[in-house]
Amino acid sequence: MRTHTKVALLLLLSVPAAGAEAQDLLVPAPGAPLDVGRGSGELFLADLDGDGRVDLVSKHLLERRVAVHRGGRSGAFTANAFALALPVEAGAIALGDVDRDGVLDLGIAIRDSTGEYVQIARGTRSGFGDPMPPIRTHAATATWKPIIRLVDLDRDGALDIVVGNGRRASVEILLGDGTGGFALQPSVPLAGGGARHEFELGDVDGDGILDLVDAGGGETARAFLHAYRGNGRGGFAMRSADSVALPKVPRATTLADVDRDGDLDVLVAHIDPLVSVLLNDGTGRFAAMSGSPFPLPGPAFNLAAADMNGDGPPDLVAATVESVTVLLADSRGYVPAAGSPYPAGPGAYRIVVGDIDRDGLDDVIASSFEGSVVRILLGNPEAHGR
């Protein structure tokens, strides 16, 4: 679908009636914030024990642990029901069933003074087992901001690992054998040198094969977005046309079908308090949406896309350090939700979105790297007319 048609569709989205009293879209969960221990970072929601309720997984970099908080009734959690101690700091984690036993496993990116590695901790119904021996992926780079994803690149039904330093112009691929074993493949070079790189994976050209979208740039380097086409065997290649300039240095990236045309679009948060929305023309080529970039109340370190107000198109949720910001898709592009930004933190650098109380409304949990509690914000039924 052409870009001008996409924008026209967005203009048809409804807006609140003039003069209507808006209720806050998100409200704090009943009771005190959940105390998960100091330094929470990445957060994941998943039903680890198979009881039909989502559990919360939190990574604690400086404490060298990954914790599981069991989900209960009405969105409550039992804090620190399980903790996996790690010998070194975990730079990034991911969840996926790598051995196909029906239980989610944990992928971990770590480093020491000489190398960068990935490890797998096999899942159990109560948590995770001891990590398997690490696999070296690259020589260590000092400015290490890793990204790790568990996805099926070669379409064999087994999850593979994609890992990147975040400050090095390459991505490392490890193909999985379906039993928890992995084989390192040749690195995939990224354009843009050793600047910041924030990548995500998704099928952007509709051929059924996962592609890689990389937002990169630095203080002295041009900011850009590149799309790398997957070959279905674990490799990627970029065409010169699959590139678009970005207005500022990127900090976070996510993929979502913003205009509901069946194509994955790209949202990029920048070091400045801005977020770019880049629309996909259906072939994996992107152009800025009308009005992009959109302002945020503060710099965003993590992005999520979800239909927060239940009107169809995905809205934008951002971790803005001391708050959670929600921008709603409407005829003007993206505008703040009622009550946004919502207090969080200190150090709300990560968020996770999901229906934790099973009421059909999306909720948000925000980390606290400089504190010990995570903030749970529930979808407000009154804001939905319930």
Image (spheres, helix red, strand yellow):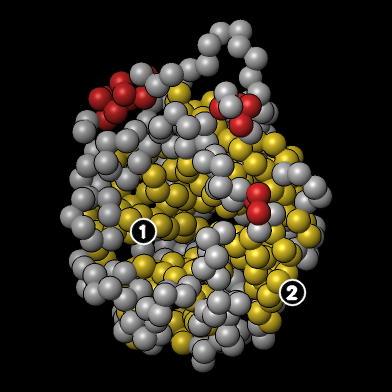
Secondary structure under tag 1 reads strand
Left or right, 108 with reference to 56: left
User: Which residue type does callout 2 highlight?
Assistant: Glu
**Pointer 1 or 2: first along the chain:** 2
Tell me: residue 73, above or below residue 37.
above
Residue of label 1: 201
Tell me: residue 74, above or below residue 235.
above
Residue of label 2: 63
Q: Nearer the viewer, residue 351 or 236?
A: 351
Give the residue displayed 66% in from the left and 24% down from the top: 23
Q: Quadrant of residue 127?
A: bottom right
Give the residue displayed 47% in from the left and 50% down from the top: 253
Q: CA gap, disc 1 to disc 2?
A: 29 Å
Q: Nearer the viewer, residue 149 or 116?
A: 149
Q: Nearer the viewer, residue 289 or 181?
A: 181
Give the image location of residue 41, x and y in percent: 65, 61
Secondary structure under tag 2 reads loop
- Tag of residue 178: none
The quadrant of the picture occupied by the C terminus is top right
Tell me: residue 91, above or below residue 287.
below
Give the image location of residue 147, x and y in percent: 49, 66
Q: How busy is the neighbourhood of tag 1: few (under 14 within 10 Å), some, or many (20 plus)?
A: many
Give the image location of residue 227, x and y in percent: 30, 53
Give the residue displayed 52% in from the left and 79% down from the top: 123
Q: Quadrant of residue 142?
A: bottom right
Give the residue displayed 28% in from the left and 60% down from the top: 210
Q: How busy is the neighbourhood of tag 2: few (under 14 within 10 Å), some, or many (20 plus)?
A: some
User: Which residue type does callout 1 highlight?
Assistant: Leu
Do we see residue 274 in this rendering? no
Tell me: residue 291, above or below residue 93.
above
Give the image location of residue 156, x and y in percent: 24, 74
